[in-house]
Each structure stands twice: as C-alpha cells, then as structure tokens.
C-alpha cells in the first residue's frame, strides 16, 4: 500500500510541478534527456524481468540483487566524481519503478492467466542490459551535476519525461513508473 501511495504521489507531483510552473520557471541549462532516456531504458527491461520471475517463481523483491546494484551505483558515482547520495537515491527510485511494473504485470497475470507469458525470457539478458545501463545513468547524473538542484529542474524534467513517454508510446503504468524512476533526480 505504501508503494502505491508513493507511486501516485510521485506521478501527481510530477504532473502538478509541470502544470503549475511550466510558464514561470527559468530555463534549466542542464541536459536531462540522457537521464530520462536511460531511465526509460531501464524500465523497458521490467516486462522481461516480470515474465522471467513469473515462470521461475522468483519473487519480485530481490534484495541481494538490489544490494549489488546499489553497491555498483555508489562505486560508479565515486569513480566518476559524482555525488553518491544523489546516485543512490535515484537508483533506489529506479529499482522501485521497475518493481512497480513487475508487480502490475504479475497482478494482471494472476487475474487473467490467459494473458500471462507463454515462455520464460532470458533473465540474464535483461540483467546484462541493466548492468550496462546503470553506470551510464550514473554518468548522466554526474554530467548533470549541480544543475539537478537548479531552479526549473523539475519543470524541465517533467517536460523531458513527457516527450520520452510519448516517443516510446508508454501506457499509463509506464508513465507512472517513469515518474517514480525520476522522483529524486531534481
């Protein structure tokens, strides 16, 4: 229930921030496109991960895997000269957003078994994609640097997220998950 409330709150904050301040916020010079694009790339793996876990019986929660990803994130941030606290906060949101999609798919498949995946995809391939995307995302956050705290960052982030969601044809749950994944960026 707490996850659902956080998901809804994040989506509402992102929507309200955009609507309320889109006309008055100063422009942000930081390029947020790489952060949003890489976040969407990470989310694109959620469907495969959900299907693999569906077939294997593994739970959506994977604390050991999450700890490994967070340790890699912290290491990457330090190596790149970024802020580990920012990188870790964003990566926690990324992990939660991926789980939002996984939980949603599992709930749908329990309710409608005829919609469940017929075959198990290769989870190793999805994890390899995540292992490639994660340091790139940390690099994008590092490149954005202090701009993440700049006035107008939230507005530019929302604008960029809307554009990426439209380009990728994200449905409502995909747009919500993208908002969750970006909650700690600015």
Image: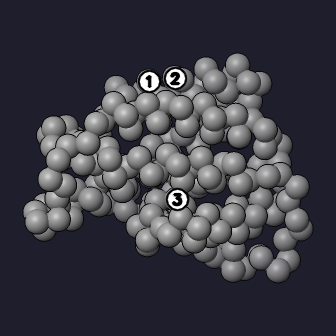
The answer to which of 80 and 44 lies nearer the viewer is: 44
Describe the element under mark 1 as helix, strand or loop: helix
Direction from residue 84 to residue 10 in the image, left or right: left
* Front disc: 2 or 3: 3
Question: Mark 2 or mark 3: which comes first in sequence?
Answer: 2
> Mark number for residue 71?
2
* Residue at the spot 51% in from the left edge and 23% down from the top edge: 71
The residue that disc 1 covers is 68
The residue that disc 3 covers is 178
Alpha carbon distance from label 1 to label 3? 22 Å
Q: Pointers 2 and 1 in contact (CB under 8 A)?
A: yes
Residue 34 rendering spot, x and y as whole percentages: 69, 48
Residue 36 rendering spot, x and y as whole percentages: 63, 54
Describe the element under mark 3 as helix, strand or loop: helix
Binning the other alpha carbons within 10 Å of mark 2 as few (below 14), some (14 to 19) or many (20 upward) gives few
Direction from residue 53 to residue 169 in the image, left or right: right
Residue 162 rendering spot, x and y as whole percentages: 62, 70
Alpha carbon distance from label 2 to label 1? 5 Å
Q: How is the image coloured?
A: one colour
């Amino acid at each position: 229930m707490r996850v659902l409330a956080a998901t809804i709150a994040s989506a509402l904050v992102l929507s309200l921030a955009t609507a309320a301040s889109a006309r008055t916020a100063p422009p942000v010079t930081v390029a947020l496109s790489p952060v949003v694009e890489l976040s969407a790339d990470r989310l694109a793996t959620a469907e495969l991960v959900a299907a693999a876990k569906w077939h294997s019986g593994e739970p959506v929660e994977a604390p050991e895997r999450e700890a490994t990803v967070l340790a890699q994130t912290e290491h990457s941030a330090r190596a790149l000269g970024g802020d580990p606290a920012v990188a870790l906060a964003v990566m926690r949101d990324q992990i939660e957003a991926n789980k939002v999609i996984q939980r949603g798919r599992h709930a749908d498949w329990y309710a409608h078994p005829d919609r469940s995946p017929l075959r198990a995809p290769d989870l190793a391939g999805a994890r390899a994609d995540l292992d490639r995307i994660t340091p790139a995302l940390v690099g994008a956050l590092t490149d954005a640097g202090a701009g993440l705290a700049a006035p107008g960052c939230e507005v530019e982030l929302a604008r960029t997220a809307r554009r990426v969601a439209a380009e990728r044809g994200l449905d409502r749950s995909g747009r919500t998950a993208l908002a969750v994944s970006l909650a700690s960026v600015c």
